[in-house]
Amino acid sequence: MNSRLRQDEIVRSLRRAGTSTVAELAIQVGASRRTVLRDIAALRDEGFVIDAEPGRGGGLSLDPHSVQTTARLSVSEVFALLISVASMRAAGNLPFSSLADSGLAKIEKALPSDKIRDLRQFLDCLYVGPLAPQVDISDMGEMDPALLPVFEPAFLQRLHLRFDYRDAKGTQSRRHVEPQAMLILPPLWYLVAWDPSREGFRHFRMDRIGRPELVPGSTFRRRHVPFDDGVRRVRFA
């Protein structure tokens, strides 16, 4: 369990139990007492009020009115929220859109400047448009949750990607590409990439991509992607 997941579990445990000892938390999150104490210090730095009562019957307790004052969202997590809103808006079924935009703006303001810069660069690769009525979506599947965490460094650092791909006929292949854009044609999502082996752009349905991985040390140049009419870059205030 990484530090972030561990700290989230500590907060949940303290909210549920009311009071817990360091030893109990260590067992629960599968870490040493020293690691839990470091996690407690990190949570306090983020704004959580965690009191310690010494002696028998004592322990750690979380102030019920305590809230986190610093954002812990990663660029890919915020990006996932933004593109979900963009996808719903493009499909014409985003209720309470002004409230959604207001909430996302507050999240963005809470991010440190380096994350905002990465987020803007990531968003610069996102496009949305209408899906042609003749496109068959009867075989649409779920997208691999590992895609966005891998796509983030691939787009920001311009690193090559490798992944398994299943085409419309069910043929499986291992692809090696230069990721150039993400295209949302609700309800389908595509990775638009330059395929060096075919010397051209290819659109890969993201629900057909599996086992994505970065190819370290293999950078590429950004290319201009020719999109059809009706496709536009996603913009946020």
Image (cartoon, grey):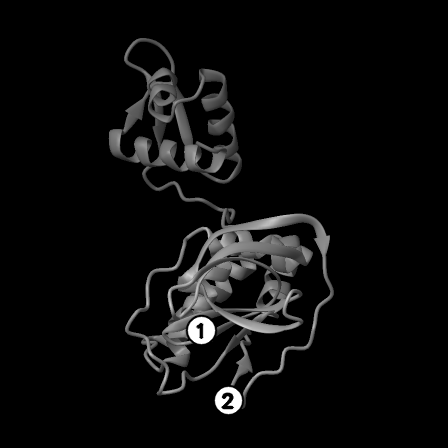
Q: Tell me the SS state at disc 2.
A: loop
**Disc count in the image?**
2
Q: Quadrant of residue 97?
A: bottom left
Few, some or many C-alpha atoms within 10 Å of disc 2 (few <14, some 14-19, many ≥20)?
Answer: few
Few, some or many C-alpha atoms within 10 Å of disc 1 (few <14, some 14-19, many ≥20)?
Answer: many
Q: Position of residue 64 (x, y in %)?
A: 32, 38
Residue on which the image places disc 2 = 230
Residue 86, label in figure:
1
Q: Quadrant of residue 125?
A: bottom right
In percent of the image, x 42 and y 32: which residue is there?
Answer: 6
User: Image quadrant for the C terminus?
Assistant: bottom right
Foreground disc of the pair 2, 1: 2
Q: Is residue 128 left or right of residue 99?
A: right
Residue closest to the eye, 125 or 222: 222
On screen, residue 37 above or below 159: above
Residue 69, label in figure:
none
